Image (tube, rainbow, N blue to C red):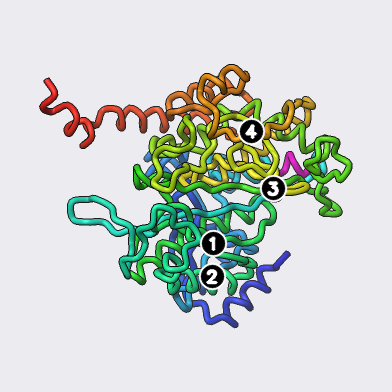
Amino acid sequence: MSTVQDVQGQLDQDGISFLLAQFVDINGSAKVKMVPASTFSNIVNDGAGFAGAALYGMGQGPNSHDMMARVDIDTYTPLPWRDGTARFACDLFVDGEPWMYCPRQNMKRVLNDVREAGFSFQVGIEPEHFLVTKSEDGSLQVWDPNNVDSLEKPCYDFKGIANVMDYLQDMMEGMTSLGWEVYQADHEDGNGQYEINFVYTDALITADRYTFFKMMTSQIAQKYGAIATHMAKPFSDRTGSGGHIHYHLADSDSGENMFVDDSDPKGLGLSKMAYHFIGGILAHAPALTAVMSPTVNCYKRLQVGAGLTSSTSGYTWTPASITYGDNNRTQMIRVAGPGNIEDRTMSAGCNPYLAFAVYVAAGMDGIARELDPGEVNRSNMYDLSLNEISQRGIRMLPQSLPEAIAELKQDEVVQAGLGVIADDFIKLKEAEWSEYHSQVSRWEVDRYLQMF
């Protein structure tokens, strides 16, 4: 753990003149105040003041006392794209007390319960995103500087990745300079879609890093005339962007992966605790979807079907069935190796602080109740018809935001993972759906204008 004096010395050594006191709103959007580095001790002890009612879901009105963003000194992050400026992730306080509408404060509350049970939640993320440009009419195009990114199956294509190598190398060098242990980047399954992977660690650190990753992509992409978007489904005919998570529980003292068992009779290398955790996830999956896929657009990615629609590449790569399997990407939960569990349903458009909080709450409920996830599903789910899936008794994830919110309203465990944020989250998402549903889209005009 760093001390204030240690960090102050690092600021001086690195020539930092300005600081960004950063937190997120209920959507996970990064918010900041910029202050001179000379005021560092002030934002450690008191915080940078915000008007909470100016943001979504912060639990304040125009008459409320100031929210104060106090820096977490262990999150010191020099901006790789701008010399002399650094960012700190912040927790929100009001009148000196932790403000639990702060997604980061809420996540720390949930993780503290996990620690009291003797564990830490270790999480990694696969941060898929698109690079696009926007025309004057508002339409999006893939950012394709050399006009080579047009293959039906562009995943891992050399020409596709060479097309944006400057952007990817800037990102990887910047992330490496921050100590994130970057280990690979690739062109993903959609034209203009990329992923840069870094090692996983404590869930709170990963949430902080994922938030900064999104900030960083926006600025590095801008350097090359592109827009980096973490929207779940920016193109109707291309694969959507997920934030697949890999995770396990570790012993809080030794760091041992508690999900590993080499004698697992099912052959996946998982412990009984891991299976109970999976049982909790499967039990609460419909309600979890509301938080892990929290926008109207997320459900354009999370589609029921044979896995062969809505993507020119041939696959959506987004399971919609509530199942778990071995190293099988058609399952919601894939066991990628002993003690390494992946959930493939989380959207790039999520708030990671809220998503991780409800996810571990659901898993811990599975452990507490010793829930059985059932037998391993080794099928290719994309080969099964909806009728076959139904005959096997397999449930499907919600197919729209209101369906997911309805599930959330009935799930006390997932609501408890959101804490006081739950009611405002539900109201905000119901309003989002109402606004969306009242719009007349271009598709409707094209289809119906002259039909009758």
Position in image of residue 26 (x %, y %):
47, 42
Q: Which residue is mark 2?
A: 172
Tag 1 secondary structure = strand
Q: Secondary structure at mark 3?
A: strand
Quarter of the image for residue 452 reads top left
Earlier residue among tags 2 and 3:
2
Against 58, residue 2 (above or below) is: below
**C-alpha distance separating marks 2 and 1:** 7 Å
Nearest-to-viewer mark from 3 and 4: 4
- Which residue type does callout 3 highlight? Ala
User: Where residue 312 sits: x, y (%)?
Assistant: 39, 46
CA distance for labels 2 and 4: 36 Å
User: Magenta includes 443?
Assistant: no
- The outermost residue toward the right is 263
Which of the two discs, 2 and 4, labels the residue nearer the N terminus? 2
Contact (CB < 8 A) between labels 2 and 1?
yes
Q: Please state which of the two labelled residues, at mark 2 or mark 3, is closer to the viewer.
A: 3
Q: Position of residue 179 (x, y in %)?
A: 63, 70
Q: Which mark is residue 196?
A: 1
Identify residue for label 3. 336
Q: Which of the marked residues, 3 or 4, is nearer the chain's N terminus?
A: 3
Label 4 Cα crowd, 10 Å radius (few <14 / some 14-19 / many 20+):
few
Judged from the image, the secondary structure of the residue bearing numbered disc 2 is helix
In the rendered structure, the answer to whether residue 254 lies left or right of residue 97 reads: right
What's drawn in magenta, residue-wise?
Answer: 111-115
What residue lies at 50% left-to-right and 28% top-to-bottom? 423
Q: Is residue 31 above or below residue 87?
A: above
